[in-house]
Image (tube, rainbow, N blue to C red):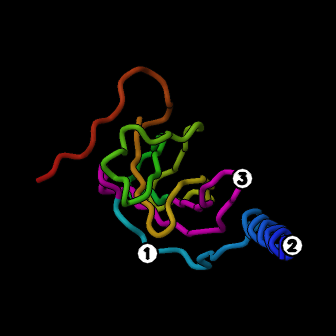
Amino acid sequence: MKKWGIFSSIIMFVMIGATAFTTTSESQSEWTQWQSTKCLKGINYRVKMDKYDMSRRARKWEIQFKNRYNATIYFNYKAISTAQIKKIRSARESRNRITLEGDGAETKALSTYVKANKELFVNITKIRFGKEDVGKNYYKCDKVK
């Protein structure tokens, strides 16, 4: 009886270990509809959910931006789960500046890992319009009318 208990414990340990290191998970094969950003009315984004990464303990998300303004825009972004939206100030900001030409130009798909399994909220930060991305002053968000 004691041997049976040890044997079943080993089997359970192996089964749990096998499922813990499995990286396959559901992924969304289609992009969401274009959504407006909270800060700028002329910048839209859409997202696509990808697979869960066990080593990062986060899901991979693809994000794409569209610029409907006439001018080139430079910005960073933050992405967070919609369930954690109140913690947006402490969310990690993108490392690289994004340059987006005007008149409907779109970015390539940008990848980020976020602990969000259902929906993603994207907020753009450190915005600058114009020919060059220099200086200390950033554009403030569009005023709500």
Residue range (magenta)? 37-64
Q: Dot 3 lies on which element?
A: loop
Pick whichever, 15 or 109, lies toward us: 15
Which residue is at a point 44% across and 42% down the rendered structure image?
91
Horizontal arrangement in the rendering, residue 126 relative to residue 40 (left or right): right
> Which residue was labeled with disc 2?
7
What amino acid type should be assigned to the residue bearing mark 2? Phe
Horizontal arrangement in the rendering, residue 73 relative to residue 19 (left or right): left
Q: Position of residue 46 (x, y in %)?
A: 47, 66
Q: Earlier in the sequence, mark 3 or mark 2?
A: 2
**Separation of marks 2 and 1 at Cα, in angstroms:** 52 Å
Nearer the camera: disc 2 or disc 1:
2
Label 3 neighbour load within 10 Å: few <14, some 14-19, many 20+:
few
**Separation of marks 1 and 3 at Cα, in angstroms:** 30 Å
**Residue 68's image quarter?**
bottom left
Does residue 21 sit above or below 94 in this rendering?
Answer: below
Does residue 119 sit above or below 67 in this rendering?
Answer: below
**Residue 10's image quarter?**
bottom right
What amino acid type should be assigned to the residue bearing mark 3? Ser
Q: Position of residue 71 (x, y in %)?
A: 42, 46
Q: Is residue 24 magenta?
A: no
Q: Dot 1 lies on which element?
A: loop
Pick whichever, 72 or 32, lies toward us: 32
> Which residue was labeled with disc 1?
33
Which residue is at a point 43% across and 75% down the rendered structure image?
33
Which residue is at a point 47% across and 70% down the rendered structure image?
118
Q: Which mark is residue 55?
A: 3
Which residue is at a point 60% across and 56% down the rendered structure image?
58
In the current view of this chain or complex, which residue is farthest to the top? 136
Q: Which mark is residue 47?
A: none
What amino acid type should be assigned to the residue bearing mark 1? Gln
